[in-house]
Amino acid sequence: MSAPTTIEWTEEFSRAVHRLIDVSVDDYYNPYRTFQWPESIEPKDLWMSRELLSVHGTPAEHELSREQLIELSRWESVNLYSLIAHGIRELLIEVMRRIHTPGYEIPTPYFHHFIGEENEHMWFFAEFCLRYAGRIYPDRRMVFPTDDRSPEMNNFIVFSQILIFEQIGDYFNAKMAADENLPETVREVNRIHHRDESRHIAFGGKLVSALFDEVRRKHSAEEIEEVARYLRGYIDLIIQMLYSREAYQDAGIPNPARFRAAVIADPARAAITARITKRTNHFYRRIGLFR
Ligand SMILES: [Fe+2]
Ligand SMILES: [Fe+2]
């Protein structure tokens, strides 16, 4: 079921949509020809920047051998790309529900670009995992809210979840694109994704701000506080999914469940989590949802 919106889109929003469409058209590439896909990727090097590994800052980072860190970097990158691929499927379903429905006439032209680009992202992240690791990790559900909330609240939550997911993913993509120590194929998928996502995140920020204005007009302070708690929980959920028991297991770490619990609880991780979520928290403070 789609959730109609009665939002009044501003002139500024409409202009931004057209600007982003122009950039999408100019930046358009054929993903099926863009990547070289070498036979294999250098197994001697890290596949994920050291400071992005889930063990970074914890005692485990120094207890693991160089070979184990490299193995972990391979499986944690597979975990990240699997999360992205599954997350894209879920967000595409939600955008598909709304394109060309009443109230979405203004953002709909951009939805076409968004849907097309996300389909291609899902393809190249899955392709990377299947080619170089032989598998994609199974779906950990990114739960979107059911229709028991008001349409405007539902819309605000859905597009917030898309924005949060894209902002956190982009933290990793931008860093890996810039890391000269990573294999070129790894840098390339991250670089291309980062370029497209900068447009999606700009669009998402404007869309979520507009949806929040509508929520604020129609809901009490208590209801708004409840949705703030819900979105904080969603941010925590994404952070927790970055600590993958399967990745620890595939990297050959004994007792991966206990290892995961220890790494998540390590006090050194709090400052790193704060960096990963900084842009998101800043955005929600700016629009007035988080304090
Ligand atoms: Fe994407
Ligand atoms: Fe995106």
Image: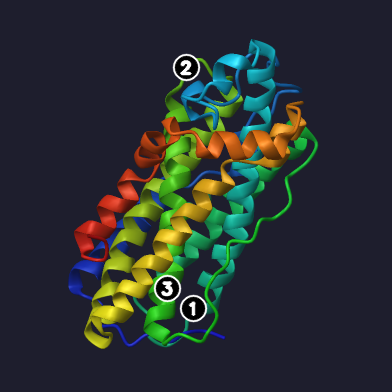
What crowding class fits label 3: few (fewer than 14 Cα within 10 Å), some (14-19), or many (20 or more)?
A: some
Q: Residue at x 38, y 66 (%)?
A: 229
What crowding class fits label 2: few (fewer than 14 Cα within 10 Å), some (14-19), or many (20 or more)?
A: few
Q: Amino acid at mark 1?
A: Arg
In the image, taking residue 67 as reference, residue 179 lies left or right, namely left
In the image, taking residue 76 as reference, residue 238 lies left or right, namely left
- Determine the image quadrant of residue 275: top left
Q: Amino acid at mark 3?
A: Thr
> Which residue is label 1 attached to?
98
- How far is the residue under mark 3 from the one under mark 1? 8 Å
Q: Are marks 2 and 1 in contact (CB under 8 Å)?
A: no
> Which residue is label 3 attached to?
108
Point out the tag, 2 or 1, that comes first from the N-terminus.
1
Q: Which mark is residue 240?
A: none
Residue 290 picture location, percent across and down: 26, 61
What crowding class fits label 1: few (fewer than 14 Cα within 10 Å), some (14-19), or many (20 or more)?
A: many
User: What kind of element bears circle 2?
Assistant: loop
Residue 139 picture location, percent across and down: 69, 55
- How far is the residue under mark 2 from the one under mark 1? 40 Å
